[in-house]
Amino acid sequence: MTDVIFIEGGRVIDPASGVDGVRTVVVRDGKVADVAERVERPRDARAIDARGRWVTPGLIDLHVHLREPGQEYKETVATGARAAVAGGFTAVCAMPNTKPVNDNASVTELVLARAAAAGLARVYPVGAISKGSAGEELAEFGELKAAGCVALSDDGRPVMNAGLMRRALEYAKAFGLPLTVHEEDLQLVGKGVMHEGAVATRLGLKGIPGQAEDVMVLRDLALLELTGGRLHLAHVSTAGAVRAVREAKRRGLAVTAEVTPHHLALTDEDVAASGYSTDYKMNPPLRSADDVRACREGLADGTIDAIATDHAPHSAVEKDLEFDAALNGIIGLETAFPVCLALVKKGLLTERRLVEALTTSPAKAFGLPGGTLARGAVADLAVLDPAAEWVVDPARLHSKSRNTPWKGKRLAGRCTHTIVGGRIVHEEGRSER
């Protein structure tokens, strides 16, 4: 197969390079060779007709759960990477809450080996902050970085011990690693299962106040100011958290933040409308309309840096239960682009900002390759059709799990081609499951 690809006639949106217009993108030997209005195509080059589509840097997801090792019945590195490229993601960061927890080089190396064998999306392991993610003793940060981890997190569990969090920020700073943190005060969460408010009261479900997130965000921003480390806030969901991040950035603190598609698109009212469907149960829970509005505004003005899916596959056995008993989380790699594109169509987000939040900004947050189509950059690209309409059929998605709130919903926007390192790894209608 030729190693030269011409992507022709598409609207190239590359915020990192300031390009937005119809261009031809030339890929040669795994790199972006040219982005130009007119380029003569050699006879032996592979051509992709991108007319009516967007050509962007490959999407980068800072927050996915690939479940391997230990829970391969939900997802594997290979199936998660296949779902990623089908959604336009060329790189994903794998959270450490596997079994065993990724708190040592052996688990990190296994994840990297599985990703290399799959040959699909790039997979960047995230190591644990504490051993076993138990919040008692710091993991070996130097060992994790040397093995290939790009960040540290106890995601799924907050670091409740403030002293341990301080030391984590200090040690991570020495190794140049960001901490990506799951912010909730477990004492305030209690036995809550959805956002605390009128909807929870009406449904008879125990609530989780937004302040359970807010107080931990404020604590960790104070510790960040003390230590001078690097902090990344996972799945921000409250107006209070957005305000705190905005103020922290104004003061020059090294903080970045992400928001999920579901926290931008859904509210606690959707739990009621769904009839207690556990596809609407996640952590953080779906919040109020005011919180959603604040998250949208924070994303639009750059307070929130990135969109991340928090792709969390679970089996039917773990989701087809009473709302109180079901596990938290939904899959999201293949629906992220169309769900967020809907915000653009509503005038809540610009096209450039959407692409930036899915490419350039996540690359900057964790210091990852990619996020640009500049000449000489690694050829990680996505071709996205903003007009393509499709109905979400979980059985036709590439994840091993089916837990999505968009089941049966008609969405607009789909990835048609994904290129990683100059190789076409996904082509709509041709990629195998």
Image (cartoon, grey):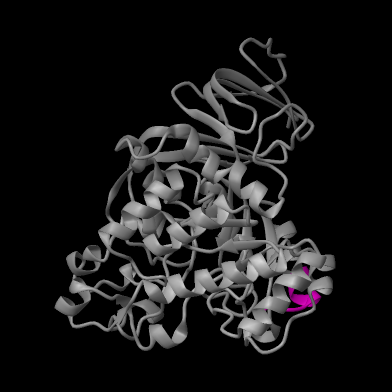
Find residue 296 and report its horizontal and vertical position in percent.
38, 49
**Vertical relation: 415 (above or below) 7:** below
Asked whether residue 392 is drawn in magenta, I would say no
Image quadrant where residue 419 sits: top right
- Taking the image as shown, residue 371 lies to the left or right of residue 319, namely right
**Residue 344 visible in the current orientation:** yes
Find residue 27 and report its horizontal and vertical position in percent.
71, 28
- Taking the image as shown, residue 212 lies to the left or right of residue 234, namely left
Quadrant assignment for the N terminus: top right
Image quadrant where residue 403 sits: bottom left
Q: Give me the residue at 40% from left, 46% from top.
A: 340
- Taking the image as shown, residue 205 lies to the left or right of residue 113, namely left
**Vertical relation: 36 (above or below) 137:** above
Q: Give me the residue at 83% from left, 72% from top.
A: 142
Find residue 96 and report its horizontal and vertical position in percent.
64, 73
Find residue 225 and report its horizontal and vertical position in percent.
65, 65
Give the magenta-colored segment's residue range: 101-109
**Vertical relation: 77 (above or below) 86:** below
Q: Between 152 and 370, which is closer to the camera in this rendering?
A: 152
